[in-house]
Image (cartoon, grey):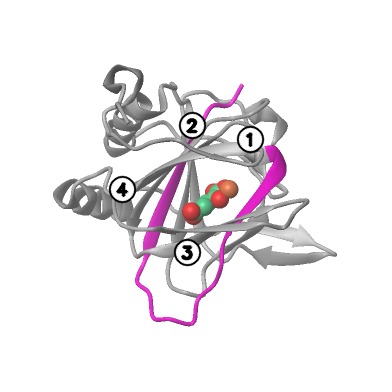
Amino acid sequence: MQLDLFSQGNSQAQWVSITNGEYLFVPDFFNVEEANRHFKTLLNDVEWKQESMSMYGKVIPFPRLTAWYGDNDKPYSFSGIILSPIQWNEALLEIKAKIEVEAKTIFNSVLLNRYRNGNDSISWHTDSEKELGLNPIIASVNFGATRKFQLRHKESKEKIELKLGHGSLLIMGGELQHYWQHQVPKTKKAVNERINLTYRVIK
Ligand SMILES: O=C(O)CCC(=O)C(=O)O
Ligand SMILES: [Fe+2]
């Protein structure tokens, strides 16, 4: 098969077509030195918060730390909470510039999740808030521990599992957010911290 290098980003990864969506996975998008540097910087420099949500009159802390950065001040609603972005820092802009080439998309915000151990997780959901528009491109960057990322088709219940490791990039596109839910399940294995960044375009 002939690769059309000019129609691609800077890696040679291929988009994978699935029923009702597509994704591109680049396991070593950042080399180890870059990934180590970003991981350390993000652990220290990001204003990590313990957010919580109210359900049936109870306050339930999210099983992870979060932060929301971006270049506009449109508030963003997520899992029942409203987040206002903090202005970009240097590390987040450096990562943004690199993934924009691959995604052929200019992002204006990023949601960060910090999974402190195997007990931290994110349960089944779609990234289909109306601020993201139709068929959003979402670029997910991973540093630190490898965790399972699962996709599940809403109708057929088909499952796809990826292991998102240190320095990897996963871009989701097409109709994927409308037809597939995703999660990072808890694990009983001893796992170190992991940081995930999902770059998004808020309309
Ligand atoms: O941590 C991950 O890989 C996924 C995070 C996620 O799905 C989200 O922030 O919406
Ligand atoms: Fe998500």
Q: Which residue is mark 1?
A: 76
Say whether mark 2 is within 8 Å of ligand 1: no
Mark 2 and mark 4 in contact (Cβ < 8 Å)?
no
Say whether mark 4 is within 8 Å of ligand 1: no
Q: Residue at x 72, y 58 (%)?
A: 157
Q: Nearer the viewer, mark 4 or mark 2?
A: 2
Q: Earlier in the sequence, mark 3 or mark 4?
A: 4
Q: Which residue is mark 2?
A: 109
Residue found farthest to the left: 33
Q: Which residue is mark 4?
A: 45
Q: Earlier in the sequence, mark 3 or mark 1?
A: 1
Q: Nearer the viewer, mark 3 or mark 4?
A: 3
Q: Is residue 131 above or below residue 148?
A: above
Q: CA distance from mark 3 to mark 4?
A: 26 Å
Q: Position of residue 109 (x, y in %)?
A: 48, 31
Q: Position of residue 43 (x, y in %)?
A: 32, 55
Residue type at mark 2 is Ser
Q: Position of residue 104 (x, y in %)?
A: 41, 22
Quarter where residue 121 is shown: bottom right
Q: Which residue is mark 3?
A: 148
Local secondary structure at mark 2: strand
Q: CA distance from mark 1 to mark 4?
A: 22 Å
